[in-house]
Amino acid sequence: VYGHDIKTQRYFGLSYYKYESTDTGMRAIPQPPVAMVAPLNLDSIFSGSNPAFTKSYLNQALDKAKRSRQDFEFRSYTMNDDRRVIRRHAIELMKKFTLSMACIVFFFIGAPLGAIIRKGGLGMPLVISVFLFIFYYIIDNTGYKMAREGRLEVWEGMWLSTFVLLPLGVFFTYKAVNDSAVFNRDAYANFFRKLIGRSQMRKLELKEVVINEVDLSVAISKINNLNTLISDFLQSNPPRQSYLQYWQNGYDSIRLHTIRAELEQMVDYLSNSRERLIILKLMELPELLSLWFYHPSSNKLLSWMFIILFPVGIPLYIIGLQQQRHLREQLEHIKVTDNELISLLNTPPHTNTVLPTES
């Protein structure tokens, strides 16, 4: 409406409309465009006039422009006030729904927390719920202020907290239904331990009752088979790979999985031994991990991306070489321990060795 007023107001004493009388009353018709024989020379307006008239024309034009500007600036302030009032009414309308929806969202967050968090009694779920409520309050208050100031649409600002917390509630509910340990500290510790390559100590105990006795020939066969797999793996995978070899090939993950499976089967079989020295020697065997750094990528396109991106690829390449060297040391240690196990298996049994007890 304001733009139409600017366009239709009188300029140079000429009206934008001309009015005609009809049977239904006066009708406003836009003036037809003026046909210009030649381009208008504005300087000709001042020709033949003295400097006093020229200054008067300019001052009148400037004053009229200033008045028009002030008029529409005042209208803009009024319009902004009206918009603010409309937004506040729209905010109150949205609150009728968002506050109700917040109760449902917090139900889907609070109820699963009580089922997921098994340690700490009532205190731990309560502490986490308080932190989540503070998080909700910050987001909700931020969305409210942005909607009030017109930086976001009203529905976007008022539903912002719901959009953020509802997926979190769905996630917690899904994890609670599937009995997942989201807040299990041990699970996260195991994840980071596998990521950085720190292996756990193998814990075995001498069994009081042994159902399947250890056969000497079968045990030695399993140990020799494991040593053969390890030797083939070490020969086929070089100690130090180049930058291109690392990202294109890495270490053979399939053969490494086979070695892990054979190692665990051998340990499981020999753990039935009645010899304490054999159990102690089995506890010296490391648990092999399947780290990402051993075989970075099986996707050729992704491998070439890391090759090209030197700032990212080189640090990962250096870490990968360290992890591969650590893997080779573990495999060599397994071979040495296997040979010692064969020696123990071929010696007469000893019964006077005592297993260490945990403090």
Image (spheres, rainbow, N blue to C red):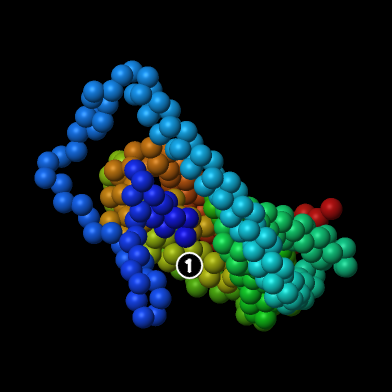
- Percent position (x, y) of residue 293? 44, 50
Residue 126 visible from this viewpoint = yes
Residue ID at (40%, 26%): 56
Q: Farthest residue in the right direction? A: 122
Residue ID at (63%, 74%): 170
The front one of 154 and 25 is 25
Residue 5: which quarter of the image? bottom left
In the picture, measured across the screen, residue 315 lies left or right of residue 352, that is left
Tell me which amino acid carries mark 1: Glu
- Residue density around tag 1, few if under 14, some if 14–19, many if 20 or more, within 10 Å: some
User: Residue 311, relative to residue 144: is it above or below?
Assistant: above
- Percent position (x, y) of residue 356? 77, 54
- Percent position (x, y) of residue 310? 34, 38
The front one of 279 and 73 is 73
The front one of 209 and 180 is 180
Residue 143 visible from this viewpoint = no
The front one of 123 and 216 is 123
User: Residue 262, relative to residue 191: is it above or below?
Assistant: below
